[in-house]
Image (cartoon, coloured by chain):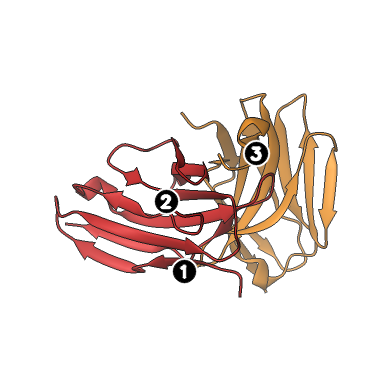
Chain colours: A orange, B red
């Protein structure tokens, strides 16, 4: 059973647009929510992560918004560029496993057109 | 250079022929994991290890074995591979409470 649901499955935006990828989780024990970026032929790379004690975290053009009551979190990419075209995965983990036990969403394939 | 290495990167084998995919990390990370990636399913954790000689099942452990005899190595063993284990496999390592660092992947085809 998928414990982290991610949407949309694919997303196409124009350069400069703000793509938003959403994730919802079920397990209230989750307390660490990372996002990974994967380019074709490469392994996923950690992009940004958030813990539920804050509602938003920004790193450069990437922002995570977190809604604990709704059990949802999302990734926003400001001023998107063609080089951001990749597959993005959300994930979740609980304190019990200190981040070693990760549950991933299904992934979103993002295309940023020039 | 900090990295996770996997070997082989590509493997074509036949049903029932035992194989091992090696994984090694040079960052002295405590935790290591194996994932498989399939279209539409994202990444699913097979096994993970929080310490030497300590391993636990992830979401899809059936048909796989692992061992953690040394901190840096975490091999994945398929004792009797089947076609439904055709997939892209990733090894990852991390420290407590930090994001996981992934290897380059191993593409396995079981005929």
Residue that badge 3 annotates: A98
- Asked if marks 2 and 1 fall on the same chain, the answer is no
Q: Is residue B102 left or right of residue B67?
A: right
Q: Residue at x 76, y 61 (%)?
A: A17
Sequence-first disc among 1 and 3:
1
Whether label 2 touches label 1, CB < 8 Å: no
* Residue B59 vertical position relative to residue B42 in the rendered view, above or below: above
Q: Is residue A4 left or right of residue B85?
A: right
- Distance between mark 1 and mark 3 Cα atoms: 28 Å
Front residue of B20/B72: it is: B72
Instruction: Give the residue displayed 37% in from the left and 61% down from the top.
Output: B22
Between A30 and B94, the residue placed more toward the observer is B94
User: In the picture, residue A91 is in which quadrant?
Assistant: top right
Image coordinates for residue B87, horizontal then vertical, percent:
34, 54
Crowding near pointer 1: few (<14 within 10 Å), some, many (20+)? few
**Mark 1 and mark 3 on one chain:** yes
Question: Does B107 sit left or right of A85 as displayed?
Answer: left
Eye-nearest disc, 1 or 3: 3
Q: Which residue position is annotated with label 2?
A: B69
């Amino acid at each position: 059973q998928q414990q982290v649901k991610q949407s949309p499955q694919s997303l196409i935006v124009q350069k400069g647009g703000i793509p938003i990828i959403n994730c919802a989780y079920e397990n209230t024990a989750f307390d660490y929510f990372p996002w990974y970026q994967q380019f074709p032929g490469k392994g996923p790379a950690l992009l940004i992560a958030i813990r539920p004690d804050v509602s938003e975290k920004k790193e450069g053009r990437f922002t995570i918004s977190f809604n604990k009551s709704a059990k949802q979190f999302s990734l926003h990419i400001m001023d998107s560029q063609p080089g951001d075209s990749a597959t993005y995965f959300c994930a979740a983990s609980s304190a019990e496993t200190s981040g070693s036990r990760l549950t991933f969403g299904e992934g979103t394939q993002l295309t940023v057109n020039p | 250079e900090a990295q996770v290495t996997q070997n082989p990167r590509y493997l074509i084998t036949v049903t029932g022929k035992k194989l091992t995919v090696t994984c090694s990390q040079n960052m002295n990370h405590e935790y290591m994991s194996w994932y498989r990636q399939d279209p539409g399913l994202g990444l699913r954790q097979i096994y993970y290890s929080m310490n030497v000689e300590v391993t636990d099942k992830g979401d899809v452990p059936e048909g796989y074995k692992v061992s953690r005899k040394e901190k840096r190595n975490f091999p994945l063993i398929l004792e009797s591979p089947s076609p439904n284990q055709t997939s892209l496999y990733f090894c990852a390592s991390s420290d407590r409470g930090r994001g996981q660092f992934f290897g380059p992947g191993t593409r396995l085809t079981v005929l």
